[in-house]
Image (cartoon, rainbow, N blue to C red):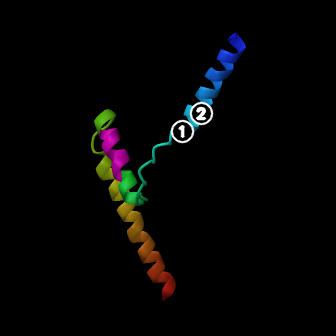
Amino acid sequence: MRKIIIGLAMAALVATSFSCDKQAEPEKKEKSVRERASEVGKFSDKTFTSGLEDKLTDIVDKNEERTREFDKASEE
């Protein structure tokens, strides 16, 4: 009798686990390097340092400028 009850309980658990649908995760938007640097800077400014967000975004912007300059120079 106990084996039957345990078997039915296990069957019920398996049936309920299959009937539950997994919630859809929201789609994540692909972020640019500058946006990610800004987020890291904001978090660090709140916890560790001050002004890191500005420094990180400036570095990313300068690297983009240099990349454009190198691309322009390589085309000439």
Image location of residue 18, percent across then percent down: 58, 38
Amino acid type shown at disc 1: Ser
Q: Residue at x 36, y 56 (%)?
A: 35
Q: Nearer the viewer, residue 15 or 60?
A: 15
Q: Which residue is mark 1?
A: 19
Q: Is residue 27 above or below residue 9?
A: below
Mark 2 vs 1: CB contact within 8 A:
yes
Asked if residue 32 is positioned above or below residue 53 in the image, the reply reads below
* Pointer 2 residue: 15
Q: CA distance from mark 2 to mark 1?
A: 6 Å
Amino acid of disc 2: Ala
| Picture layout, residue 23 above or below residue 56 | above
- Magenta-drawn segment: 38-45
Q: Determine whether the residue tagged by mark 2 lies in a helix, strand or loop.
A: helix
For the point 29% across and 36% down, the residue is: 46
Task: Identify the residue at image location x=59%, y=27%.
Answer: 13
User: Mark 1 packing: few (<14 Cα in 10 Å), some, or many (20+)?
Assistant: few
Q: Nearer the viewer, residue 30 or 13?
A: 13
Q: Which mark is residue 60?
A: none
Residue sticking out furthest to the bottom: 76
The image quarter containing residue 69 is bottom left
